[in-house]
Amino acid sequence: MSVAGIVETTQCLTFKLEDEVFALDISKVREVLEYTTVTKVPRTPDFMCGVINLRGGVVPVVNMRLKFGMTDAEKTVNTCIIIVEVTLDGETTILGALADSVQEVMDLEADQIEPAPKIGTRLNTEFIKGMGKHDSKFIMILDIDKVFTLDELALVQDAGEQESS
């Protein structure tokens, strides 16, 4: 969906990584969990924290700071895992996105959303749906389906399957 396609109010869950605020379409969010012990899976990418047990199911957890090239941070009382549904090539994968903190659920009107910045051809900003304006600050609205490549999701799925067998 392009920004031009955003014509109605979008409900988003906002969360923080470092000092930046990001948002996810609320329809992609299943739930928010307190940070819990994550079981590390060997030979996975750096951004892959490991897996958690969610009601008997194995859910891979991804450190969003590392995925976006930020430095890792100490876990705090606000650190949480956002359980999201990612759809790629028609397949839905459930995964946990590790965030510094969850802010709020907010409505963004179409006129509060600007297109994602074009930053040359070398930087891929496809995963940014748009830039929301709220209280004179920008919020990066993520397209969670485009944050991960097919190969990365395959690695994440494989890690979850290894742990459950």
Image: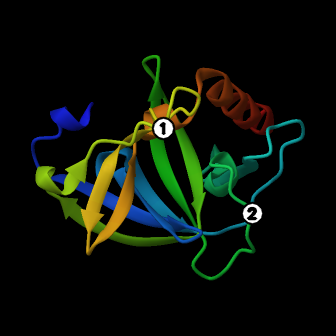
Would you place residue 91 above or below residue 60 in this image? above
- Percent x, y for residue 163? 79, 39
Q: Which residue is mark 1?
A: 119
Q: Is residue 86 visible?
A: no
Would you place residue 13 above or below residue 128 in this image? below
Would you place residue 88 above or below residue 4 in this image? above
Q: Quadrant of residue 159?
A: top right
What residue is at 41 percent from the left and 36 percent from the top?
A: 118
What residue is at 18 percent from the left and 57 percent from the top?
A: 112
Looking at the image, tell me whether mark 2 or mark 1 is earlier in sequence order. 2
- Percent x, y for residue 21? 44, 65
**Relative side of 7 to 97, left or right:** left
Q: Quadrant of the C terminus?
A: top right
Label 2: state its secondary structure: loop
Q: Which residue is mark 2?
A: 72
Looking at numbered disc 2 in the image, what kind of residue is underneath it? Asp
**Relative side of 7 to 14, left or right:** left
Who is closer to the viewer here, 15 or 126? 126
The total of numbered circles placed on residues is 2
Which residue in the rendered view is the most extreme toward the top?
89
Who is closer to the viewer here, 123 or 87? 123
